[in-house]
Image (cartoon, rainbow, N blue to C red):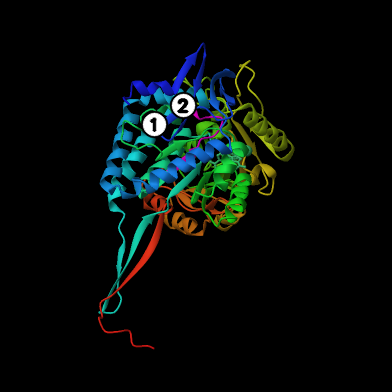
Amino acid sequence: MTIAAAAKGATRKSEVTRYQMYINGKFTDAESGKTFEVYDPATEGIIATCPAGGPEDVDRAAQAAHRAFYEGWKGTTAQERGRILFRLAERIRARRAELAELETINSGKPIVEAEYDMDDTATCYEYYGGLATKINGEVLPVPADAIAFAMREPIGVAGQIIPWNYPLLMAAWKIAPAIAAGCTVVIKPAEQTPLTLLKLAEDFEAVGLPPGVVNVVTGDGPGAGAPLVAHSLVRKIAFTGSAEVGKLIMRSAADQLKRVSLELGGKSPNIFFSDADFESAVDGALFGTFINQGEVCSAGSRVLVQRDIYTKFVDAAAAKAKTIKLGRGLDRETKMGPLVSSEQRDRVAGYLEVGRGEAKVAAGGGRPKEFDKGWYVEPTIFYDVDNSARVAQEEIFGPVMSVIPFTDEADAIRIANASQYGLAAAVWTRDIFKAFRVVKSLEAGIVWVNHMQPTFVEAPWGGYKASGFGRELGHWGVEEYLETKQVFINLDEKPIGWY
Ligand code: NAI
Ligand code: MG
C-alpha cells in the first residue's frame, strides 16, 4: 500500500471526519459498529468520530500482535527494526505541519508547542532506531571450565495505554522502545485525543512495519483499556495516566502476574531560594506550571519560595500570569489554549473553588470572560498555601500554581518531600553546594537545577513513590520490554560425578 492510498484510514463527511482504528495492518471499525465523538476544545465542536473498541476488538488486535510476534517479527534483525524506526521518524518530520495542526485542533495546545512535540516525537523514534542495535547481553565471570552469559529477549506482546496531554509523543515513548526491543504492540490512545496516532498509522505499512506489529485500538478506559490489561496474550502493560487507573491496572495485571510499568503524574515542587536569578526564577515558575495549560505530569505546580523574596515573587508572578495570552491553539500568538475536555475543565474548576477556600488568589481563579466557547481556564496563582491543603497535595492537571513560603534549606526539603508523589522537582539557586545538597535530598525521579521541564529522550523518565515505577526513555525505556535469560555452558566433558 502506498502512503497516498493509505489515506483511506480516514474519510471526511461534511465537517466531521470518520476515523477507523488500525488492527493487523488494516483500518477497521469496531465489531459492535459503535463510535464515539472527538472534539476541538477551542470550539467545543465535534471534529471526528472513532470506533468505540470493545473486548472483541482488543482480542483481534492482541491475536494479530501475538501472531506477528511468533510468525516473523521475533526473527527480524535489530538493524531492520532500527531502520523502520528511522523511516517512521522521517515520515513524522515530513508531515510535521499536518500532524502538529491536528494535534493542536484535537488537544487545544498552542501550535508552537505541538510543533515541538512533533520534533520530540521524531527524535524519540530516531533514538530508539539507533538503540535497537545496541541491546547487548553480558558475558559473566564463571569458572574457567564454563561460559555463562545473560541474553536479552523481547517480552512479546506489549499493551500500552496513554493519556491525552501529549498524544503523539506519549505514543512514541511507548511504541519506539517496544519496537527496538523486538516486541509487538497493541496501543490504546486516550479517547479524547486519538487522531494523530491514527493519522501516523497511515504510514506504518510504508515504513516496513508488518501487519500486526503495531495495532491501534481506540475506545475508552473501561471498554478498551481494561480488556487490554486483562488479555492473556498481552505480556506487559505500560501505562501513563491517573493514579486511580494505575491502581486498577496493577490489580487486574496481578491475576496473570503481568509486568506493569506506571507513570502516574505528581505534584512536583519547584523550589526558589532567594539567591536565584529573580527574573529567570519568576519565568521558570510560570513555565514549569503553565506549559501545555498545566496538563503536564511533571508540572511544577507546588512553588516553594524562600521568605525573603516571597512577596516580591508572588507579585511578579501574578503580574506576568495576567499577561499570558489565552486563545485558540492554532493562533501563533497563543501562549495557553483551552483544556482538553469539558470534564477536565470542570475538574480544574472544582479545584479553583477548593483553592479559594484554602488560600489567597494572586491571579486568575476562574474561567476567562472573553470566550463564549472553549474549555478555557485562567492561569491561576494561589499563595499562602499550606502544604497540607488539597491544592498542594492533589494533582490538578490544569493551569493552577500553589505558592508556599519556606524559611531555609531544611524547611524547603521537608516541604518538598511531604507529598505522596515523587515524579519531578526543581531547585533554583546560584549556590552550587546548596543546589547539590538539595538534589541529593529530593525524593523524585527527575530533578532539574535552574530550569524546569526540559526533557531529553536520552535521560530516564519516571517517578518515586505514588508517581509509579519503571522508567521510560534512554536505555531504561527499552529495559521495560526485555526479558533476561541466563545461559550456562559446561565445557568440562567429564561426567558430573555426583551420584
Ligand atoms: P485516566 O487515567 O482515566 O486516563 C488515561 C488513560 O487510561 C486513557 O487512555 C484512558 O482511556 C485509560 N483508562 C481509563 N480507565 C481505564 C481502565 N479502567 N483500564 C484501563 N485503562 C483505562 O485519566 P483522566 O480521567 O483522563 O484524567 C484524570 C486525571 O488523571 C487528571 O486530572 C490528571 O490528574 C491525571 N492524569 C495524569 C496523566 C499523566 O501524565 N501522568 C495524564 C492524564 C491524566
Ligand atoms: Mg479517568
Q: Position of residue 490 (x, y in %)?
A: 29, 76
Please give the residue where the numbered disc 2 appears in the rendered image.
103
> Which span of residues is magenta-colored?
185-195
Q: Residues within 10 Å of mark 2 (few under 14, many from 20)?
A: many
Residue extending farthest to the top is 14
Secondary structure category for the residue under label 1: helix
Give the camera-side residue of 321 and 119: 119
Residue 118 shows which numbered tag? Answer: 1
Residues under numbered marks 1 and 2 in contact, where contact means CB atoms less than 8 Å apart: yes
Q: Residues within 10 Å of mark 1 (few under 14, many from 20)?
A: many
Quadrant observed for ligand 1 in the rendered image: top right
The answer to whether any part of residue 162 appears in the image is: no
Q: Amino acid at mark 2?
A: Glu
Residue 188 on the magenta span: yes
Secondary structure category for the residue under label 2: helix
Question: Picture quarter containing residue 385?
Answer: top right
Q: Amino acid at mark 1?
A: Met
Give the camera-side residue of 32 and 99: 32
Q: Position of residue 496 (x, y in %)?
A: 33, 84
Residue 166 on the magenta span: no
Give the camera-side residue of 192 and 315: 192
